[in-house]
Amino acid sequence: MAEEPVFFMSGTLQIEGLLQTKPGDKGVVITHPHPLYGGSMYNNVVESLVRVYQQAGYATLRFNFRGVGSSHGEYSDGTGEQEDVRSALRYLSERGKKVIDLAGYSFGAWVNALTKPPVDAVQSMIMVSPPVAFLDFGSAQPLPQLQLVIAGSRDEIAPQELIQTTLPNWNPGARLEVIEGADHFYGAYTEKLESILTDYLAGEPD
């Protein structure tokens, strides 16, 4: 089943997304990298996240943050983007998804970490390359839903050493997986990324 274009409201703004529906309770909202550096829902890592979650039986919703593509509004330094995340979670919930994951790459992982959804709105969270050397995660802890963080060994924006020192503040039970040789953009490493994600989702409770 192909993804279909959808629009939902984030406050007064219309947000553009792509939704693939699946039967059952499980869904995931997937967020993209930095809007000011060309990030959109068509990013290669976002595509990998979408593919793996779909194969695992999740309904997937990816969307363009405000000011990107056909989404209304303008870049909001992460603040308005948090409302976009809450609205996307609400959109999936209103479509009958009771078990919702939140997955983000780079800037998307940062926005997800800062977003304060209702505690029961997100079952589990994963971050790919949270940009801890580039953006301030200071108000993001703790993150009890965080289960998995993935980073590349050559990623200067999300250096593994800094993630390792920050992870206990987020969730000491979360796992860090480092892909040897990968930088922030995962060129030639998306298959390894997808393999880690597939194994992780295979172990998640239904």
Image: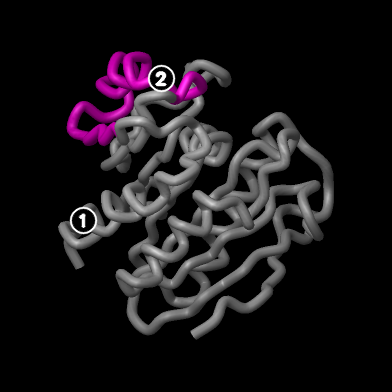
User: Which residue is at a point 41% across and 24% down the rendered structure image?
Assistant: 154
Q: Position of residue 6 (x, y in %)?
A: 68, 73
Q: Position of residue 49 (x, y in %)?
A: 44, 56
User: Which residue is at a point 22% across and 35% down the rendered structure image?
Assistant: 175
Question: Which quarter of the figure has residue 62?
Answer: bottom right
Under mark 2, the amino acid is Pro
Mark 2 vs 1, N-terminal side? 2
Residue 84 drawn above or below residue 8: above
Evaluate whether residue 116 shows in this view. no
Residue 166 drawn above or below residue 59: above
Evaluate whether residue 175 shows in this view. yes
User: Which residue is at a point 65% across and 33% down the rendered structure image?
Assistant: 78
Q: Dot 2 corresponds to which residue? A: 159
How many dots with numbers? 2
Q: Dot 1 corresponds to which residue? A: 199
Q: Position of residue 147 (x, y in %)?
A: 27, 42
Range drawn in magenta: 155-178
Under mark 1, the amino acid is Asp
Disc 2 element: loop
